[in-house]
Amino acid sequence: MDALSFVMNTWYVIGTSQELPKGQLKSEKICGMPVVMWRTQDDKVVAFDDRCVHKRMPLSAGRFVEPDVLECAYHGLCYNPEGRCIRIPSQPEGPIPSRAKLKRYPVIEQDGLVWIWPGDEARMGNMQPPPSPEIASSEWDTYTVDPIRVPANYRLLIENLIDITHFYPLHEGNIGDYANSQIPIELSEPEVAGIKTVKQMRRAQNHVQPQFFVDWFGYPVVDRWHTHHSLGPGLTRVELRVAPPGKLGEGEAERGYILYHTHTPADGRNLIWRWSLSTRVEHRSASDSAKTLNESICETFPAVVDQDRWALEKQQQMVEYPDEGYTEIHLRSDQALIKVRKLLTQLEGGQTPASADKAAA
């Protein structure tokens, strides 16, 4: 695995809708490139190369001198929401060079998330970001964490999220225990919006839950469906559904959550991680009825994330060493991981998910 690489021709999350209010500049490094973005007065998010075309000054260090007119802090070149230079103080009478225009990145705002396409726009075609409808739905109570910056390649996080068997021992004492690792894994490769994805499910009957789950849902023994779904390089969807034995699928008894993880490569050694946890608005915490189920889970879930982050940083440190004399083995439970690696490698070769699917066929 080349864990310093990343896919360019795909959609990545650059922020939530709430992170981008009107009139505020936001900057990020995405896929090794500096990006500046803002929400315009007509409520559209725009994103550009963060370098002024004159002397490479970061435009994110500038200011708005008029609504949607961004002034560079170095020499005062001004840019409009199309990225075109419209004013040069040292040349008030013009002309403005025709090449004085910023590289613009395609942006889509969808389901409360703002997505950017950092690669070749000609390869985008009709490809859309994967859906995450619960985040923006009034029927779901959703909490989204502030961006988590991890010194690790984003592929390590994608593999962590598709790998359900690491719950023991990494998460022992909270969401994981030894019995959790014994649940059989079902693997599928469904298409979502015409894009090949990788999905794992674990079904269990009469499953004895770890105490954290009992505190959240109130059921010591359950029937359980647990899925981890890699929807592409930018998003992983996790769904947990539990109910008393024989009651799974019955709305009144069923409890659970939907968890979205976004993984955006800053560069080959750093990633930006966000997670959003959604629960039904009517569900309360089993251990404290004064709290919503969402509040109860979000009090304890950050400890799980911290354990994953610790593991990712340790793995990245080992990736930096040459592989001479080292061989990574795979277990039967790694089938989803292997499929995700294969798909990402195809995509890193410049293919879009649709063309990669045809190549695999």
Image: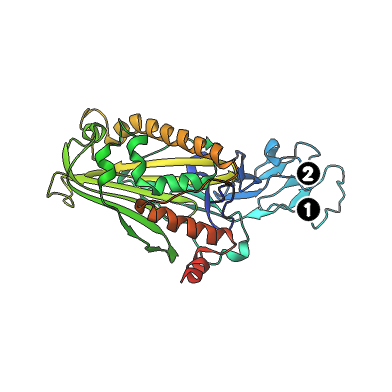
| Circle 2 residue | 77
**Residue 166 percent location from the top left of the image:** 36, 41
Callouts 1 and 2 close, C-beta under 8 Å? yes
Structural distance between the alpha carbons of marks 1 and 2: 9 Å
Indicate the amino acid at tag 1.
Answer: Ala
Is residue 69 visible in the rendered structure shown here?
Answer: yes
Q: Earlier in the sequence, mark 1 or mark 2?
A: 2
Residue at 34% over, 30% down: 300
Residue at 79% over, 37% down: 74
Residue 282 in which image quadrant = top left
Indicate the amino acid at tag 2.
Answer: Leu
Q: Secondary structure at mark 1?
A: loop
Q: Secondary structure at mark 2?
A: loop
**Residue 107 percent location from the top left of the image:** 56, 54
| Circle 1 residue | 100
User: In this rendering, would 208 be left or right of 351?
Assistant: left
